[in-house]
């Protein structure tokens, strides 16, 4: 699938983007493991969160929906999962694979997790190494990549893990295994990462103690079902936020967006660049802060992106790089090596695409240096990375000719309906099969 986006336009309107991917995954996982029935609203009906949903169905959990974002999960309790008939295929979804690895290592059955060609290149030792210290038997390919094979029937022991990388997926994997381990399991983060797992565990009445950068829980408790309202995904809202920042005459309001402080790096970074963003109607929904975000066009300036914002904006950099092209002065990103092991090597793939479009973008080992310039038309390869595809689509707003983006089918992993919504709000985009 290709996107063809005609140059020019501006974004206007008040609208809601689909549900948060991270929270949608966790709602299925924790709802399945709870005692009782969990009702989820605002669930992301994208391929990634559906991969998690299907994995739990394959392990015997009765799940109704999704229907207009509503999902009903008949929880089986922490010890109620059944051995799946075959390997669990989680497609493009790193979150499904890494979180499930923790959970499955504590079950009494063997299991195997497989993924698509992108996921099959991504590093899994970051979860299998600490899991081994909990007495699990979890293996990967020689290169530390999927498939992951897991031996069931192990008695897990709690431990303290000092995480070398700031990763919410690793933290969540260990905490999920910790639910089944003897004694206390703690994770110390080198920098704050998204805390949806901790918040949702507490929402399901499981005690999680956060003390600075250390998060602990004690195994052997139970999860109690509750209702979960999934906010709109700030990572999906980002494409529109950037579009509105860069296209003159834009004025949009994104409704009911999750503004958990572990996710708002994009707002902080865009504001440092001079963006006109206001946060209105702040409220809390099921333990997660939510607001309506208004973004109006404003001239931007280049900055050195503060490294403490990197984990808080980790999925938003492809779009932020587009904003950097029309800022006054250069933008420098450092401390973001993790971008190289996302759905694609986001530093290299963005640098290549920007170069094709006439921008001076120099990749570095752990970041990029972008000089402002006029974006010209051309064809860029998204390498099957949903966030790269949507970022380059927004670049057309400020381009002087049509931008064609190839390999876009994976936009459906996180943002079903992107093309229709983008068109409705002012982007001149069409899908070419
Ligand atoms: C996620 C954590 C982040 C993020 C990913 C979703 C999560 O990955 O990039 O899209 O839901 O926990 P890392 O934890 O590897 O940084």
Image (cartoon, grey):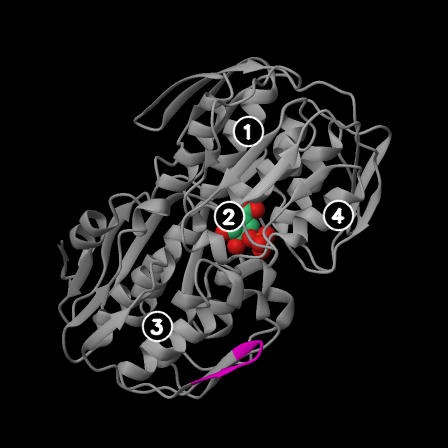
Alpha carbon distance from label 2 to label 1: 14 Å
Residue stretch in magenta: 362-367
Residue located 56% across and 17% down the image: 82
Task: Find residue 177 and report its horizontal and vertical position in percent.
Answer: 71, 34
Q: How many marks?
A: 4
Q: Is mark 2 within 8 Å of ligand 1?
A: yes
Q: Which residue is mark 1?
A: 29
Q: Which mark is residue 94?
A: 2
Task: Find residue 316 and report its horizontal and vertical position in percent.
Answer: 45, 61
- Local packing at callout 3 (Cα closer than 10 Å; few below 14, some 14-19, many 20+) is some
Task: Find residue 68 and report its horizontal and vertical position in percent.
Answer: 30, 27
Instruction: Choose the circle earlier in sequence order: 4 or 2.
Output: 2
Residue located 59% across and 77% down the image: 334
Tell which residue pokes out farthest to the right in this image.
183
In the image, residue 349 sits, relative to residue 96, either above or below, namely below
Nearer to us of marks 2 and 1 is 2
Residue located 46% across and 82% down the image: 302
Q: Which residue is mark 4?
A: 130
Image side of residue 79 versus residue 278, left or right? right
- Local packing at callout 2 (Cα closer than 10 Å; few below 14, some 14-19, many 20+) is many
Q: Nearer the viewer, residue 433 or 172?
A: 433
Tell which residue pokes out farthest to the front in this image.
142
Alpha carbon distance from label 4 to label 2: 17 Å
């Amino acid at each position: 699938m290709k996107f063809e986006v005609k140059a020019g336009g501006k974004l206007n309107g008040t609208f809601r983007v689909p549900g948060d991917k991270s929270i949608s995954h966790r709602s299925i996982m924790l709802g399945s493991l709870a005692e009782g029935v969990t009702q989820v609203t605002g669930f992301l009906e994208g391929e990634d969160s559906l991969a998690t949903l299907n994995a739990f169905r394959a392990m015997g959990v009765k799940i109704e929906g999704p229907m207009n974002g509503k999902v009903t999960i008949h929880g089986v309790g922490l010890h109620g999962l059944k051995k799946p008939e075959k390997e669990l295929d989680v497609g493009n979804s790193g979150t499904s694979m890494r979180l499930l690895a923790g959970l499955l290592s504590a079950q009494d059955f063997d299991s195997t997790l497989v993924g698509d060609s992108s996921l099959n290149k991504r590093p899994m030792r970051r979860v299998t190494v600490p899991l081994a210290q909990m007495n699990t038997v979890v293996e990967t390919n020689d290169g530390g990549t999927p498939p992951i094979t897991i031996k069931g029937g192990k008695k897990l022991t709690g431990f303290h893990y000092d995480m070398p990388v700031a990763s919410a997926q690793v933290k969540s994997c260990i905490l999920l295994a910790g639910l089944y381990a003897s004694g206390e399991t703690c994770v110390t983060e080198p920098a704050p990462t998204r805390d949806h797992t901790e918040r949702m565990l507490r929402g399901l009445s499981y005690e999680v103690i956060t003390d600075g950068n250390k998060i602990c829980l004690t195994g052997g408790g139970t999860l109690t079902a509750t209702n979960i309202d999934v906010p709109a995904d700030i990572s999906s809202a980002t494409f529109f936020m950037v579009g509105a920042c860069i296209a003159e005459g834009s004025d949009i309001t994104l409704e009911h967006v999750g503004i958990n402080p572990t996710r708002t790096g994009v707002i902080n970074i865009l504001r440092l660049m001079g963006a006109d963003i206001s946060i209105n109607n702040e409220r809390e929904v099921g333990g997660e802060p939510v607001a309506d975000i208004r973004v109006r066009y404003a001239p931007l300036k280049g900055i050195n992106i503060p490294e403490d914002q990197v984990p808080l904006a980790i999925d938003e950099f492809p779009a932020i790089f587009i904003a950097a092209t029309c800022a006054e002065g250069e933008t420098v990103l450092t401390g973001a090596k993790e971008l190289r092991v996302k759905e694609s090597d986001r530093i290299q793939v963005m640098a290549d695409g920007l170069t094709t479009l006439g921008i001076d973008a120099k990749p570095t080992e752990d970041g990029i240096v972008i000089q402002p310039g006029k974006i010209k038309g051309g064809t860029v390869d998204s390498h099957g990375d949903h966030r790269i595809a949507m970022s380059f689509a927004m670049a057309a707003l400020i381009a002087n000719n049509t931008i064609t983006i190839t390999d876009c089918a994976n936009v459906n992993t996180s943002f079903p309906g992107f093309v229709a919504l983008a068109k409705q709000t002012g982007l001149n985009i069409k899908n070419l099969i």
